[in-house]
Amino acid sequence: MPEKIRHPPIDKEKVQQAQAEIHLLKDQCKGCGYCIEYCPRKVLEESEEINARGVRPPKVVDNSKCIICSFCTAICPDFAIFVEEKPTRKTKEV
Amino acid sequence: MLQKLLTGPHFLNGDLACAEGALLAGCRFFAGYPITPATEIAEHLSQRMPELGGIYVQMEDEIASMAAIIGASYSGLKAMTATSGPGFSLMQENIGLAVMTEAPCVIVDVMRGGPSTGQPTMPGQQDVMQAKWGSHGDYGIIALTPASVQEMFDFTIEAFNLSETYRVPTLLMADEIVGHMWEKVVIPSPEKLKIINRKKPQVPPEKYKAFKPDDDLVPPMACFGEGYHFHATGLTHDESGYPKTSSSEVQSELVNRLCQKIEKNAHKIIRYEKTMLDDAEVAVVAYGIVARAALSAVRKARENGIKAGLLRLITIWPFPTEQVAKVAKQTKGIVVPEMNCGQLVREVERAAKETPVTFISKLGEEPHTPMEILNAIEGVN
Amino acid sequence: MVLEEVHPFSKYLRAEMMPHIWCPGCGNGIVLNCFVHALDELKYDMDKLVVVSGIGCIGRTAGYINTDSFHTTHGRALAFATGVKLANPELDVVVISGDGDLFAIGGNHFIHAARRNMGIKVLCANNLNYGMTGGQQGPTTPLESLTTTSPYGSIEHPFNLVHLAAASGSTFVARWTTLHVRRLTQSIKKMMQKKGFCFVEVLAQCPEIYGRYNKMRSGLEMMSWFKRASVVENFSDPSKAEISSDKIPVGEFVDIEKLSYERMLHEKISKINEKAMEKV
């Protein structure tokens, strides 16, 4: 959840926001940059390392910003990135 | 009363006999395009196929017809198309695809006067070399030449059996006369017919390799929808079926196997008919409608005291080199009458080696008369 | 961040054939991704699916999807697919091919398959040129484009594929770009569940060749053209849906019901056999 929200959700205390699990298959990436460019929350950026294909795969800047929209998963031409929800989300009974 | 499958004696023309033969062989898919003189096959099957629950579809051209029958074959049906010279030329690329993907199917070419549009209503034998070499690349193929309406019926069934056994497109090279003439055909009842179906895989899908051959060089064939999830391509491929376009070993192995599949089994495929050849000094080698005139000429020659004999080729591809060579050794000359400018005679010359070969060409509406062939026999004698 | 080796869609792909041969940023990879995503959402029965492809970069797709597949000669995918579908109407036949394969050499087969309303689904990756052979002009290359066989600019008017498909009788016609991944996936899902001839065109970028020749040197630049120019115009007139540098009309243009060929054939065969039984 972002730091400052004007009208926070009523059940903010009860429901824990889903946590993203971003999987990067680094050596499959061909460096096209679509996931970085079109992520609505700018979660990814180009990393410094060079992978087996000689390009720079993405790296996660801030995992907590990811809203698991899965646009990166859908737009990757090389099946090199996918996002899943961490299986620890619970609803707290109050 | 509507009869499902014909049996007994019937008066049919060659095209109709071919169509009925296909139905009895189990063919349930026909895709074609009208072309003289093969149109009657399409017309007859458009009526008969639905009666037997089969499919007739008229495609937009011969290229599509050939592609469609490969598709139907891969979906599990026995499939056939029928055409003549111009359509046969169009089909060549996809005949190559059928050879490469080892799709069993039958193509009937009712030959007519060529080249190009030629003489649509006149006979010819001008496509016989194209039958073997028409598509690009090296491959083996089977081609049969019927000489009567009964043979149009019998050889269509034989063509289906051969194509299913060897997973190769099989050609029935008829001509306009055999296609359009009317003769008596005796159709045996279905139980008496020998029908062969393609080998199916004996292993579960995880272990199946689509193009892994058995000892006879023919791979068992799975079909779409059976859960095998295989891939077939016209690109050079290995046993798994996946394309491997950069390897010399894979190309060499695949192309050699496609050729050897037919050559190695040639002794089981080749058929011919010998008449009065045992003590012959002059032999006539002929096929198709011309063989009927040749038979008459040979009989006349015998009456005149010449020891003549006839080798009638039934399978022109694979070419019966051994049989022709044997005949050449025992005779002093061979006569080859063809309705073209010299096609199969080249193969005869190659097999005959030292024995002189006389070629008689005839183009146009009539095949050779027995007199013309007799003159040539007398010339050799 | 946990590193896991297995992508959730890898069960739909042939592991021995991956990674695919397509260039970095190639739209074909996205087309494959959307197609497989649609199959996953539909929980598709892969035993019923047959993928037929033609020649071209997109033609390699048949080798990558883990189902019965066939890679035909250039342009003949639809004719082959006709044979497959008619021989076994239970199968779902999808033709995945390119603009050149389907509309130049294969143009005749396309219009007839659409006219007959064969129950075949066509997914066309339109990359505006012949990519596999090095970037020659094709039937969809925009006017004045530079390609290896139009070095002075193309002087051929391109096809409006949506108009061509609709006019030929297709019962479902849609066009999206590779940027519209969600809507493309939804259109593919709709297409897979429909009877009759369906056509989905995807504008796929070819950054290495077409883009490079035409001032869009990277996949991202081509994507930004898609983003800038595309306008969603569902059910607008297909004849006015031409692609230009300023406007790419996308959307679902046609969605009608029409008796499919297989259905009519089946009905005829039943009727004929009923009559035969009556006479017996």
Image: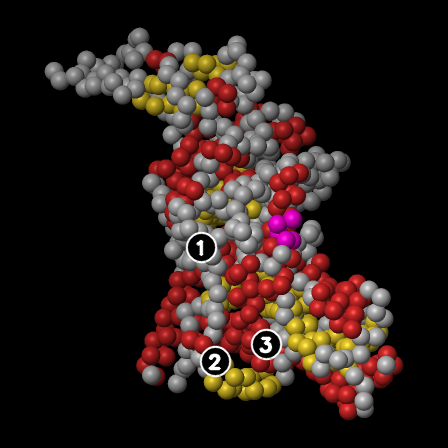
Q: Which residue is mark 1?
A: B200
- Say which amino acid is labelled 1: Lys
Disc number placed over residue B105 in the picture, else none = none
Q: Residue furthest left?
A: A94
Q: Position of residue C200 (x, y in %)?
A: 48, 44
Secondary element at tag 2: loop
Q: Quadrant of the N terminus of chain B?
A: bottom left
Name the chain under label 3: B
Compute the Cα span from label 2 to label 1: 28 Å
Tell me which numbered mark, 3 or 1, is placed earlier along the sequence: 3
Secondary element at tag 3: helix
Magenta residue check for B274: no
Number of other residues with Cα within 10 Å of mark 2, as a class: few under 14, some 14 to 19, many 20 or more: few
Q: Which residue is mark 2?
A: B188
Q: Is residue C257 above or below residue C138?
A: below
Secondary element at tag 1: loop
Disc number placed over residue B152 in the picture, else none = 3
C229 and C120: which is toward the camera: C120
| Residue in view at x 55 percent, y 57 percent | B167
Residue bounds of the magenta highlight: B256-260
